[in-house]
Image (spheres, rainbow, N blue to C red):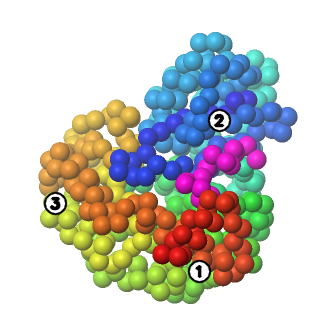
Amino acid sequence: MTLIYPRWSKLQRQTEFHLPPHGPVVFAATVPEEVDITFVDENVEDYPLTDSPDIVALSVMLTIQLPRAYEISAQYRARGVPVVMGGIAATLHSDEAAAHADALFIGEAEGRFPRVIEDLKKGRLKPVYNHFDDRPDIGLIGTARRDLLKRELYNYRGVQMVDLIHASRGCKFNCFPCCVGYLGGRQFRPRPIDRVVEEMASIPNNRLFLVDNSLAQERQWLIDLFTAMAPLKKKFVCHPILDDDEILSLAADAGCWYVYQAIYDTSDTIRRRVQRLKDHGIGVEGTIILGTDDHDEDYIKRLVDFIQEIGVNMAEFTVLTPFLHSPIRQRLESEGRIFDNNWQHYTADRVVFRPKRMTPEKLQELYYYAWDTFYGDNGLQIKMGELFMNVIRKEMKDGTYRGYNAKEKRVFKKKSAN
């Protein structure tokens, strides 16, 4: 099998860096051991696509990856190589994606994918394997096949990027821009904590990214998870954590380095939430969606000022994007406000709908304004460098810093001297 992760474009204004992908290596753990896998991440390497494996698997996470996935599939299928396509975007766009693969796999693959290999051997590959409503036992999730990753390719200016891992699936929340409730279900499905910790311990990298959609769904589970993680002395990044002092203290003890915190207004609630994270020694990267119905030009400019005022370490601005099967998609479609369904434009940095309080052109202009204003006095690379300095200090304090390479050591010494 040649397993391919199609290339995709980074946000405009965002510094380009690449994390080791998670979906492909989680999927690879569901493939029978007898199958020899060659993994290709087009985002960090060139691959000629001239090989002729028994099967090509396309792992498609983002809508923006779909056009490239279709190109890859067409090249292999023209030579008679069968292609199976799966992943988040393939599931969201299943009706369309099915026309671009010999087999489309919908849903979660644990315990299900061996059937695809058996059918391939017998020459009767099915056009669709639909397991969308047939979710596997969460205990079947195995350790991701990180051995397939070419680790040397996942560095940013000599700094080792984080490894991704997930401790749960599903989300009880149904936030307006998000597809997780549709994809993973509205029920919180935690993995057995001992299996999660075992997988974390097996990862050679000391720096992790818990990619769970939310770490705010079940308080006791968080207590148990962070308590079990603490002895590993790993350092981790995650999405929002339950805003609770005991939970935040446990998260910090477990190695929480920084949190992606949604900042959706200028309220004291947000101000206090950011401050509590900082009080526990946890950095904050604000994630800000621009273009909701309460946003006009003045509001967005005040929001950018607020973000600077409350002292978040970094910020990631995106344009509201109506991805398929998200609650906001349904509403904007019903109101006739979506004017662009070219998936190559669904990059979260381009306006594809008509905002309520401004023109699409003005919203696009304000997207650039937000990035340029927030990073105007101190470039993104410098802010990112400072954030990595924080984790190096944490690692040095507890004796886990490994000096990942000579360049990272030089960067740390230079910044410390300054």
Coordinates of residue 309 in the picture (x, y in percent): 29, 77
Residue in front for this viewpoint, 239 or 84: 239
Magenta range is 147-162
Q: Examine the structure image and report whether residue 60 is included in the region drawn in magenta.
A: no
| Residue 402: percent from left, percent from top | 72, 68
Residue 354 visible in rendering: yes
Of the two numbered discs 3 and 1 in the rendering, the one whose residue sits closer to the viewer: 1
At numbered mark 1, what does the secondary structure look like: helix, strand or loop? helix
- 104 in relation to 204, above or below: above
Is mark 1 in CB contact (under 8 Å) with mark 2? no
In the image, residue 261 above or below residue 71: below
Determine whether the residue tagged by mark 2 lies in a helix, strand or loop. Answer: strand
Of the residues under marks 1 and 2, which one precedes in the sequence?
Answer: 2
Residue shown at the point (74%, 59%) measured from the top left: 203
Within 10 Å of the Cα at label 2, are there few (<14), some (14-19), or many (20+) other Cα atoms? many
**Image coords of residue 337 (percent x, y):** 22, 43
Mark 1 = which residue? 252
Q: Amino acid at mark 3?
A: Asp
Which disc, if any, is residue 40?
2
> Which residue type carries mark 1?
Ala
Residue 127 visible? The answer is no
**Mark 3 lies on residue:** 296
The quarter holding residue 300 reads: bottom left
Relative height, residue 365 to residue 411 (above, below):
above
Tag in front: 2 or 3: 2
Say which label, 3 or 1, has the lower sequence index.
1
Mark 3 surroundings: few (<14), some (14-19) or many (≥20) residues within 10 A: some
For image coordinates 55% across by 54% down, the residue present is: 156
**Tag 3–tag 1 contact (CB < 8 Å):** no
Residue 112's place in the image compared with 266, above or below, is above
